[in-house]
């Protein structure tokens, strides 16, 4: 039997509570080690492939921020969660196609994956007509300069995918608000190298856009390193919710 969003099995709730306690402890320890205030770091529960009932249970445990990376799944899940009377802050963290912009702005509070001027413009247009408040945006950075896996490219003058043009485009819109940067450690890179490079990039961006203070970096396996290098948001899936169900 599939759980309804408002009904969570006691054993599943206990699993989530235990995972949450472990992750919170890791974040607190990492903040202490980095001499940072724990309140500076927000945990985003990435619930891709998990049911709406898990989101409702996590909200009941005090989790306020939830991430999804596929619009097809996220739109329906957000509606289910809302119908259950729960209102988390939804973060869209996956690669986003421009034709999904109108759907995403209806439920997302934050989009972490803007990596082109064209996508910024599509989100701006969709937000202007589909929202009553600005959409918070983080520009995704390609740390290694390879755009194949998504991300605006630092030190590139490309008018669509260069990091400067993308951040300037977001900042120059009426319906978007540039709040910071997001990145994933590139394959084959040690987390220390990746997040040290990201910190350098973030410093350069803040020199031009001082309000862009958010830094979304770090996942289940490397959140401690990301926090050491200034992450303000960590995106946690398996360490919190357990092994992911198989996609079908």
Image: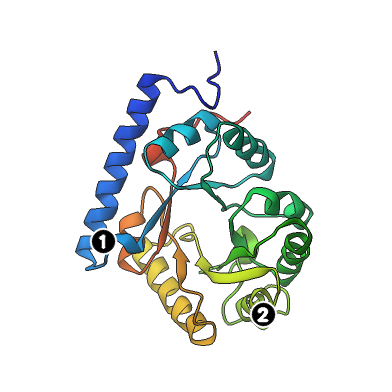
- The image's mark for residue 141 is none
- Which residue sits furthest top? 1
In the image shown, does 177 or 73 lie closer to the viewer? 177
Q: In this picture, is 94 found above or below 214?
A: above
The residue drawn where x is 59% and y is 55% is 109
* Crowding near the residue tagged with mark 2, few <14, some 14–19, many ≥20 C-alpha atoms within 10 Å: many
Are discs 2 and 1 less than 8 Å apart at CB? no
Circle 2 — which element?
A: helix
In the image shown, does 221 or 36 lie closer to the viewer? 36
The residue where tag 1 is placed is 31
The residue drawn where x is 39% and y is 24% is 12
**Camera-nearest label, 2 or 1:** 1
Which quadrant: the C terminus?
top right
Query: Where is residue 170 drawn, in percent x and y?
Result: 66, 73
- Which residue sits furthest bottom? 207
Q: Is residue 127 left or right of residue 205?
A: right
- Gap between marks 2 and 1 measured at Cα: 33 Å
Scheme of image coloration: rainbow
The residue drawn where x is 64% and y is 37% is 79
Which quadrant: the N terminus?
top right
The residue drawn where x is 67% and y is 83% is 157
Query: Where is residue 107 drawn, in percent x and y?
Result: 65, 48
Q: Is residue 88 visible?
A: yes
- The image's mark for residue 165 is 2
Query: Where is residue 212 drawn, in percent x and y?
Result: 51, 75
* Crowding near the residue tagged with mark 1, few <14, some 14–19, many ≥20 C-alpha atoms within 10 Å: many
Residue 77: quadrant of the picture: top right
């Amino acid at each position: 039997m599939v759980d309804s969003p408002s009904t969570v099995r006691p054993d599943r709730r206990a699993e989530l509570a235990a995972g949450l306690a472990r992750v919170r402890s890791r974040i607190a320890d990492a903040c202490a080690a980095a001499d940072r205030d724990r309140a500076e770091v927000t945990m985003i529960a990435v619930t891709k492939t998990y049911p709406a009932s898990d989101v409702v249970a996590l909200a009941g445990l005090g989790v306020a921020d939830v991430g999804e990376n596929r619009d097809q799944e996220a739109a329906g899940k957000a509606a289910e969660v809302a119908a259950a009377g729960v209102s988390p802050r939804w973060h869209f963290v996956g690669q986003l196609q421009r034709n999904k912009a109108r759907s995403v702005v209806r439920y997302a509070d934050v989009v972490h994956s803007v990596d082109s001027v064209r996508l910024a413009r599509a989100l701006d247009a969709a937000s202007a007509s589909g929202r009553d408040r600005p959409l918070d945006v983080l520009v995704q950075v390609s740390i290694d300069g390879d755009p194949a896996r998504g991300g605006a490219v630092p030190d590139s003058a490309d008018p669509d995918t260069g990091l400067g043009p993308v951040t300037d485009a977001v900042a120059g819109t009426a319906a978007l608000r540039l709040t910071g940067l997001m990145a994933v450690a590139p394959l084959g890179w040690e987390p220390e190298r990746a997040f040290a490079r990201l910190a350098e990039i973030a410093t350069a961006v803040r020199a031009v856009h001082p309000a862009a203070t958010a830094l979304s970096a770090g996942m289940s396996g490397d959140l401690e390193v990301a926090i050491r290098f200034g992450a303000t948001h960590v995106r946690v899936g398996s360490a919190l919710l357990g092994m992911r169900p198989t996609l079908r």
